[in-house]
Image: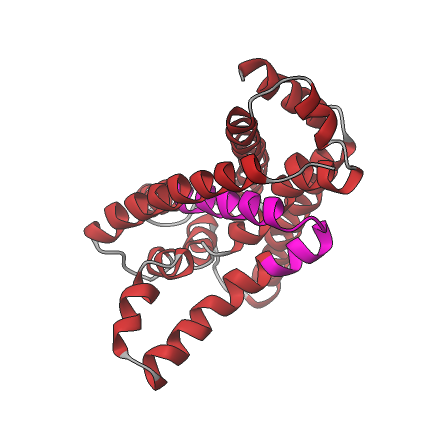
Amino acid sequence: MINYIKAELYRNFNRAYLWVYTAIIAALVLAVNIIINISHAGNGVNLSLSNVLEITNSMMIIPVFLVAGMIDTVIAEENKNKTMKNVIALGIDRSKLILSKFIAAVILACIAAVIILAVLYGSGALLLGLGDNFNIIFLDHFKRLAASFPLWMAAIAVGIFLNIIINNSTVCAFVYAIVFLMTPLVTKFFIIFVSDKFKHVYNILITTQLGKLSARVVASHDFITSIIIGFIYIIVFLAFSILCFKKKEIK
């Protein structure tokens, strides 16, 4: 299993996809900080890295869609090129294969996140300055990131599951986006027109938990709840993925 994870990481490290994908997102982050700096110089609005972090705190849902790139390169690519059969032929246990794919995707996402956040913090500090109460704001920002991390990993687990039950990578990407965009809306519809008991479903959605972590003020119990729910999603969807993959005929 460890050897397969190493092989998966080596394969992706030597492909342009990972680095180009990360570079594009990092470039967009840098461009935003440059635009803020220019606007700040032009109209006298005093924006700093502290302000940028506060804005970033309200966008914890975005990585759910960014990790789709990691899912694509780790598992969807093999579905697309029909090379999964070759991997199975090597005698790798299917359960370990799924776990290896998940771990590899998480590691790649972490590497991309470190690079992107380094650009965010570095360019923000150089172009905008740290600003008032930076230590307090950064600590709050870090706590939100830490609590969101299991939910983002859960999104990867959901994506892997979808790639196992849907062979077409384009359709799978579309379904993945629909799941996270439409499920909250559909659940709200059921709350209003069917039963308020659907609130229990709504409250445990990944998007709902990330919404709570994106609020201006986050309650202490919300940090803990988000972490617990994130790990429950990971366990459940990895279990579903393993069960489905064991029964799936690989062509």
Q: Quadrant of the C terminus?
A: top right
Location of residue 72 in the rendering, given as x and y in whole percent from the top left corner: 67, 42
Q: Is residue 191 left or right of residue 96?
A: left
Q: Nearer the viewer, residue 97 or 122?
A: 97
**Quadrant position of residue 147:** top left
Q: Residue furthest bottom?
A: 193
Q: For the point 25% across and 49% down, which residue is it? A: 225
Q: For the point 71% across and 34% down, which residue is it? A: 19
Q: Examine the rendering and report whether any part of residue 169 can be seen.
A: yes
Q: Examine the rendering and report whether any part of residue 138 can be seen.
A: no
Q: Is residue 246 magenta?
A: no
Q: Nearer the viewer, residue 116 or 46?
A: 116
Q: Quadrant of the N terminus?
A: top right
Per the rendered image, the range of residues in magenta is 149-175
Location of residue 107 in the rendering, given as x and y in whole percent from the top left corner: 54, 29
Q: For the point 38% across and 39% down, which residue is it? A: 235
For the rendered model, the colour scheme is secondary structure
Q: Nearer the viewer, residue 13 or 26?
A: 13
Q: Is residue 44 left or right of residue 239?
A: right
